[in-house]
Image (cartoon, helix red, strand yellow):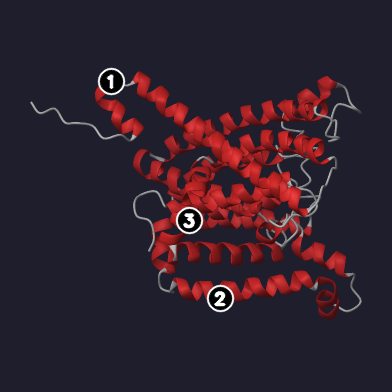
Amino acid sequence: MQPAGKRDVRIDLLRGAAIVAMVVDHVGGRESWLYLLTGGNRFYVSAAEGFVFLAGLISGIVYGRVARKDGSGTATVKMLRRAGILYCWTVALTLAVPFLAGALGLGWEDPARDRPLLEFVVGVLTLHRTYYLVDALLLYVLLFSVAGLAMALMAEGKTLLVLALSWGVWLGWQAFPGLTQVPWPIDGMELFQPAAWQVLYFTGLAMGFHRAKLGLWLRRTSARAYVAASGLGLTASVVLYQHEQQLLQALAPGTDAQTLAGLLFSKADVRVGRLLAFMLVATLTFSLATLAWSRVESWLGWLLIPLGQHSLTAYVLHIGVVLSLTKLGRVAFGAEDPGRGPNMLLELTGVFAVWLLVQLIVAAKQWRQAAAAPPAEIAPILRLPVLKNAA
């Protein structure tokens, strides 16, 4: 069974799962029991790929609907407005996080140590400088800034052109990274190279825009078949990861296994092996959510769906939670990396802290709307029953 309605709640649930995985990977130290579920940001795929791809998918669904109803110009303006909001948050956080980390004594990089403070501020304002945990938001700013143009092209029936350009830039980065760095070099952007990561977003954007047609095509094969095929592929990936050195040396004798692994699975460059691993994980998780929706929703929906429906808010909040819990962990356990058990405790605390903050923000917004609404409209806002006027 799968959820009904315009909004596909399965996507929200998967976005929430990506948020949970990112909180776990960012809060914990080198080892944690929860890394068996998240990969610990070491496996061939991480939550970040899903976060970016699903952002493109949702953008294609939401703004594609706007483009069809009100025209591509309206959709483009809305996406640019979204980029502007993201820009403001990105600048504010990039300026704040390094100094908060310094005040807490976390030992993170001090970007103003080897340069004038004004140079750092100007670099942030002009999107030439980013910082740990805020780099993903800067990537979003860049993607949303040009996504409106891609949406306009797709509305004119030029989806293949958009995909050709996106995959062409990705391929150019794989072969000639020095010649295809777009839009410009960004200090601190080592983990999310825009020329590589954009392929996930724009592929998702195209899939979301053509969601109805794609859904009809995918239904030709049963969800169980997708689970079986992707499950086998993911199992093979796990085996390769666990025996990487031996298997890669056997596949390419005389080649350094670590170098070959980087060429196949580098996260910053979104290598081809990483794309394949992401495809397997995405297919498996979405198919499982479809087959077992009732159970998945009843067991995990209360946690994951709110996080997924407010994923960018959750991501911004998780930055503050990571700062706080990193300091708390060192104070409470007296070590930078206290071990699997304490790390898991901190990670679970972080997950529920982000969830609670999201719930409080949503509740506060609903109460503000209720306070400003006429009495007859308060009940729908608060999702409360209302008595009809008997007269």
Query: Mark 3 Cα within 10 Å, few/some/many (few <14, many 20+)?
Result: few
Q: Name the residue under label 1.
A: 374
Left or right of 274: which side holds 334? right
Q: Mark 2 points at which residue?
A: 229
Q: Is residue 23 above or below residue 101?
A: below
Left or right of 155: which side holds 86? right
Q: Mark 3 points at which residue?
A: 299
Residue 334 location (% of width, % of height):
85, 40
Q: In this view, does 154 lie above or below 353?
A: below
Query: Mark 1 Cα within 10 Å, few/some/many (few <14, many 20+)?
Result: few
Dot 1 or dot 3: first in sequence order is: 3
Dot 2 or dot 1: first in sequence order is: 2
State whether residue 153 appears in this view.
no
Q: Distance between the residues labelled 3 and 2?
A: 25 Å
Where disc 1 sits, the SS reads loop
Where disc 3 sits, the SS reads helix
Under mark 2, the amino acid is Ala
